Image (cartoon, grey):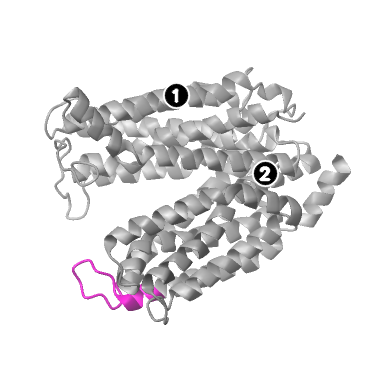
Amino acid sequence: MNLSFGKKCVYALGQFGLVLCAFGAGKLFVSFFVNGGISGSHDFPSYIDSRFYFGFFTVVGFIIALNRLIDFLGGLVSGWLSDRSRMKKGRRTGFMIASALPLAVFSVLVFFPPVTGESPANAFFVAVCTVCFFSALALYTTPYLALLSEFGSTPRQRMQLSTLTASASALAYLLGNRISFFADHFAADLSLSPVESFRLVIALFALVSGVCLAIPPLFIDERRYSQTDPVTDGFSDSLSIVLKDTYFRSYLVSDLMYRIAAAFIMTGFSFYVTLLLGQKPDTVALYLLIIFFVNIALYFPVSIIVGHLGKKKVLFAAFLMLMLFMAFSAFAGNYPLDPFAQGLILCILAAMPLAVFTVVPNALVADLTVASERKTGIQRGGAYFGIFSLVVKAGELVSVLLFPLIVAIGSSGAGVPGRAGLRLTLVLAAIFSLVGFISLFGYREKEIASLFEREE
């Protein structure tokens, strides 16, 4: 049964709620508890001891590491649990309903430590709230994504759903980035302190998010679109079965290489602009806005092109564009062209592959999930998306560990990367992309498409 366009939009609301809800606890946690403010303001009180213990970690650092671990592994566990679920509401939507309210509530409570000033009680409270938040986030996210393979009855339908959720993510991210604007206005209009106005915005975001998170499981009956029996395998057996899918393994390697390369680019982007192109720091923000809006503008054109050419060919083209970007960037500042114009060209070259790798992967993983179901009669969408989410986060983690080591080459100290190191990051990113390009040959889209055609 096909999902109507209206219900596809309803489904996408869940992604809007996820991104908006996670914006505060995920992206502004350090600004609140370490930097003492947002957007250059440092008017927030200090709630958690900032001293180093054993010479290398802080309390906030420990909390962040703990939550990264939960975020890293939570998708695997929640995906497996949803595959096994026998909830009457639906094995995916049951988890979504159960976690929507806690997710919204704990996204606010994180920023309400109970004691004024630095206190162990604050550290304990914040640690508990963030653990609950990231646990609820995992319990909602992976079952939600697994629904792509159930609500999308054809590759085209799954691609449409993936594009709509990508668009919802972009809108939520855009709204989240306006938090300082709203906080400043509330502070001025309502005579609130900076921390009070910030908390008010976070609470309003949580209210909107909670509604958006609850709407898809309440208004779409999962049971009408999926009739398969729950998985009975244990955790390790279930993951092992999914990883035996050779097409899936090939795509995982390909996607991992892209994630590392893309994380290198985004981590070093401001340095590429200021040190290699010699532009002012303000130009970085302009370039990022250009990339962001060009990226969004390409979502639906990419979806249409995929419908004509297929996902594999479009991903191949995206890898080639990414390598072209890095080849051009490696010599940025040395071309007989105005540096600002060089930056504009780089923005366009970066935005195109980013758009492809934003809208295509979830639809492709959903295709593989459905193909496996057609062959085995068992729907393991939770395990497929749980493993995929782990690979996405692993790519980002590898970049975080490698990038600082590489940019230190040729550095003069004082936290300023060396130009030789920066150019080397682009060379390595190109190598990662090439490995991803080659690995993509192991994904046989025609064989999967023929399976769909035979079954349909």
Q: Is residue 327 visible?
A: yes
Question: The residue tagged with tag 2: helix, strand or loop?
Answer: helix
Q: Amino acid at mark 2?
A: Met
- Residue at 43% across, 41% down: 173
Residue 445: percent from left, percent from top: 75, 55
Q: Is residue 428 left or right of residue 36?
A: right
Q: Distance from label 2 to label 1 (Cα)?
A: 26 Å
Q: Amino acid at mark 1?
A: Gly
Residue 50: percent from left, percent from top: 16, 45
Q: Is residue 428 left or right of residue 411?
A: right
Q: Nearer the viewer, residue 75 or 276?
A: 276
Q: Quarter-wise, where is residue 352 in the image? A: bottom right
User: Which comes sooner in the sequence, label 2 or label 1?
Assistant: 2
- First to last magenta residue range: 408-423
Mark 2 highlights which residue?
Answer: 159
Q: Nearer the viewer, residue 296 or 408?
A: 296
Number of numbered markers: 2
Query: In which quadrant will I find the N terminus?
Result: top right
Q: Crowdedness of circle 1 by 10 Å Cα count: few (<14), some, many (20+)?
A: many
Q: Nearer the viewer, residue 210 or 8?
A: 8
Question: The residue tagged with tag 1: helix, strand or loop?
Answer: helix
Mark 1 highlights which residue?
Answer: 210
Residue 137: percent from left, percent from top: 45, 33
Whether tag 2 and tag 1 are in contact, CB under 8 A, the answer is no
Tell me if residue 43 is in the magenta stretch: no
Pick out the residue farthest to the right.
454
- Residue at 17% across, 38% down: 48
